[in-house]
C-alpha cells in the first residue's frame, strides 16, 4: 500500500491534502492541473478513495453551495506525515555538502 501511495500523482494529491484538508475537487484540479492531466487526477482520486481507502469523499460548503471534496482518512494521516519526514531526511542526506577549506 505504501509503495502505491507514493506514485507521483498519488503523492502530489496527498501532499496538497496534508497542507489543507478537506479540499474540493476543483481546488485539486486547479493546483495540480499543470502537472497532471484531468484524466490522471480523476483516476488518482478514484484509486485513493475507492481502492485504497486513503481518501474519504466529503461534501464541502462553498460560496456556490455544496461541492464534492476529499479528506484524508484520519488513521492514515500519521503515516503520510511520517513519509514526509522521511522524504526530508533523504533529501538532506543527498544534498551536496560544502567543503571546508
Image (tube, grey):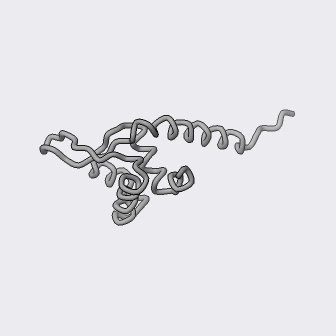
| Residue 50, image x, y percentages | 36, 55
The image shows a total of numbered marks equal to 0
| Residue 28, image x, y percentages | 33, 50
| Residue 91, image x, y percentages | 65, 43
User: Residue at (13%, 45%) from the top-left corner?
Assistant: 64
User: Residue at (41%, 37%) from the top-left corner?
Assistant: 19
Which residue is most to the left? 65
Q: Nearer the viewer, residue 28 or 47?
A: 47
Q: Nearer the viewer, residue 94 or 3?
A: 3
Where 5 falls versus 78 (above or below)?
Answer: below
Where 71 falls versus 41 (above or below)?
Answer: above
Q: Is residue 52 left or right of residue 29?
A: right
Q: Is residue 7 left or right of residue 68?
A: right
Residue 18 quadrant: top left
User: Residue at (28%, 51%) from the top-left corner?
Assistant: 25
- What quarter of the picture does the C terminus occupy? top right
Where 20 falls versus 7 (above or below)?
Answer: above
Q: Nearer the viewer, residue 64 or 60?
A: 60
| Residue 10, image x, y percentages | 46, 54
User: Residue at (37%, 37%) from the top-left corner?
Assistant: 20
Q: Is residue 75 left or right of residue 58?
A: right
Q: Is residue 92 left or right of residue 76?
A: right
Amino acid at each position: 500500500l505504501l509503495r502505491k501511495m507514493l506514485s507521483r500523482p498519488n503523492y502530489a494529491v496527498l501532499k496538497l491534502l496534508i497542507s489543507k484538508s478537506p479540499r474540493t475537487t476543483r481546488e485539486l484540479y486547479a493546483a495540480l492541473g499543470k502537472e497532471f492531466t484531468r484524466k490522471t487526477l480523476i483516476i488518482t482520486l478514484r484509486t485513493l478513495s475507492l481502492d485504497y481507502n486513503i481518501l474519504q469523499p466529503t461534501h464541502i460548503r462553498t460560496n456556490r453551495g455544496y461541492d464534492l471534496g476529499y479528506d484524508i482518512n484520519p488513521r492514515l494521516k500519521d503515516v503520510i506525515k511520517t513519509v514526509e519526514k522521511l522524504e526530508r531526511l533523504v533529501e538532506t542526506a543527498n544534498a551536496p555538502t560544502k567543503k571546508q577549506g
